[in-house]
Image (cartoon, rainbow, N blue to C red):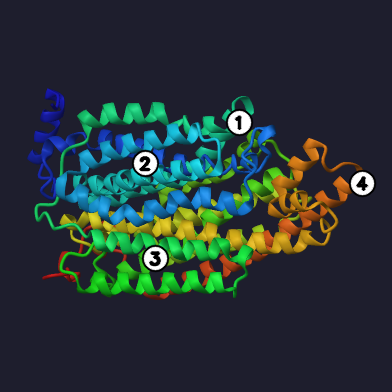
Amino acid sequence: MSTEHERDAGVAITEVGVDLDGIDPEVYAKRWKTLAVLCASLIIVIVGNTVLNVALPTLQRPTDLGGLGASNTAVQWVVDAYGLIFAGLLFTAAALGDRFGRKGALQAGLLIFAAGSVLGSMADSSGVLIAARAIMGIGAAFVMPSTLSILTNVFPARERAKAIAIWAGISGSGAAVGPIASGLLLEHYWWGSVFLVNLPIIAVAMIAGQRLVPKSKDATESPLDPIGALLSIVGLSALVYAIIEGPHHGWISAASVLWFGLAAVVLVAFGVWEWRTRHPMLDLRLFRNRRFAVSSGGITLVFFAMFGTFFMLSQYLQGVLEYSPLGASVRMLPFSVVMMAVAPQTPKLVARLGADRIGAAGLLLVTAGLIGTAMFRPDTAYLQLAVTMGVLAGGMALTMTPMTTQLMASVPRDRAGMGSATNDTTRELGGALGVAVLGSLLTSQYTSGVSSTVAGLPGDVREIAEGSIGGVRGLIEQGVLTGDQAGRILTSAKDAFVDGLSIAAIVAATVTFVAAIVVKRSLPSDRTSPEVTGEPARAEVPVAGS
């Protein structure tokens, strides 16, 4: 129940004639407290994803040195199992929240996420860890769209852009907060402890959410789309499997062709089904709206670049520059600091200069940061690394807010769940593909670059050395590789890794540069349009079945 003060505040607000856009005054009076709970829930999902980045090199260590003996391919699956399930279930989870209540979906998602975190902390093999990450992905699929759709329903249009900017800033800063927490835990505890950091936050978010998060749901109660959900999961999983396993099987091998073919067939079937069914989980007609199409594409591509880059940077800091997990995480702080500083200022810049200019400028900054990443070598100074991360963070902050605001403004408020799920799916799909594509480019170049140096090693030792730079360091720590041989192989591994990092970063930079051009040409420049302020353009988007 609301306090007397909150009720009085709500009445006072309505008396001075402020337009609440139909929002209950009591809900409006505690909107900022509600946002705090939503941001806490969001940070759980983001940190739960990024906390693993710093632990990846530890997972690649041999089991008798406290790791899982995971190869580059295995750690790609550990990362992408989360993103794939997350992306595949987002629309279904959002639809369940729209139909049965977003508050309940948020609470259920937090519980599922906690269960996956506990299982992950106890995993004794890559397979169990991958399964735990998938469970966490299920929970995240309920949490993340609920946060944004609830936000849309508690803030009026005039405040929505600011609230989304805070939401986006928390989302971005979580990408760096996770590694810091991970580094601190890895300094003193076993690698599984990184999954337990979320549990106290989950408890606080659930208790506070019971009081501060209002109940809301879609009045239309549209039917679910289980066939669409199944097709999306199968299609995306087949695509990511083909990309991740490509370096191992060979890009033009029968296995790769089969998996790419399966992905193409299933994803086409998904598109046909979503277009024809009366109640799709993803209304493809929304993409007729240029703002919706361009903003969702922009979010996908910037997260493609950023998740893939973070996946590689953690291994670069520890495997090549030889920082400890804590040292590596601390050195990623510039990203978090710049993200939190820039994101809250973005709505003002958009109002002054337009979403097209700010979004394009952000993507160009990301491009510049990726070019800087491509220049990293085994002896790169930290100052260069810090500046590069700052540029990447500034670009991401400038991109996320206008893209998210444009996307959410393109759908009716009663379809907020679908809009939020689209926003979150583009992030997770982009991130999963970024880890798969950029990670596979890195793996291919690394394996090719180090193969001649390790050719004379015994079969099982050679396989470990070709699997990852973390494997090489583990072999040295075990005493399997010693003396000049160890130095020569480690030098070769470092050179091969940075060559792969450079190739992957250039590919990502090309993608974001093209995206910047498209955003500048296609997003509206009208700085007083509803999309800039956050007001939904209700009549502009046709809805399936209407």
Q: Earlier in the sequence, mark 3 or mark 1?
A: 1
Residue 347 in view here:
yes
Q: What secondary structure is marked by label 1? A: helix
Distance between mark 2 and mark 4 Cα atoms: 49 Å
Q: Pointers 4 and 1 in contact (CB under 8 A)?
A: no
Q: Mark 2 points at which residue?
A: 42
Q: Pointers 2 and 4 in contact (CB under 8 A)?
A: no
Q: In the image as oriented, which residue stretches furthest toward the right?
A: 484
Q: Residue 421 carries which label?
A: none
Q: Earlier in the sequence, mark 1 or mark 2?
A: 2
Q: Is residue 278 left or right of residue 405?
A: left
Q: Which of marks 3 and 2 is nearer the N terminus?
A: 2
Residue 509 locus on image (x, y percent): 58, 66
Q: Pointers 3 and 4 in contact (CB under 8 A)?
A: no
Disc 4 crowd, CA 10 A, few/some/many (<14, 14-19, 20+): few
- Which amino acid type is marked by label 2? Leu
Q: In this view, does 264 lie to the left or right of 536?
A: right
- Which amino acid type is marked by label 3? Gly
Distance between mark 3 and mark 2 Cα atoms: 27 Å
Q: Which of marks 2 and 4 is nearer the N terminus?
A: 2
Q: What secondary structure is marked by label 3? A: helix
Q: Nearer the viewer, residue 283 or 250?
A: 250
Q: Pointers 1 and 2 in contact (CB under 8 A)?
A: no
Q: What secondary structure is marked by label 2? A: helix
Residue 55 locus on image (x, y percent): 59, 39
Q: In the figure, 244 relative to 166: above or below?
A: below
Q: Which mark is residue 235?
A: 3
Which dot, 3 or 2, sits closer to the camera?
A: 3
Disc 2 crowd, CA 10 A, few/some/many (<14, 14-19, 20+): many
Which dot, 3 or 1, sits closer to the camera?
A: 3
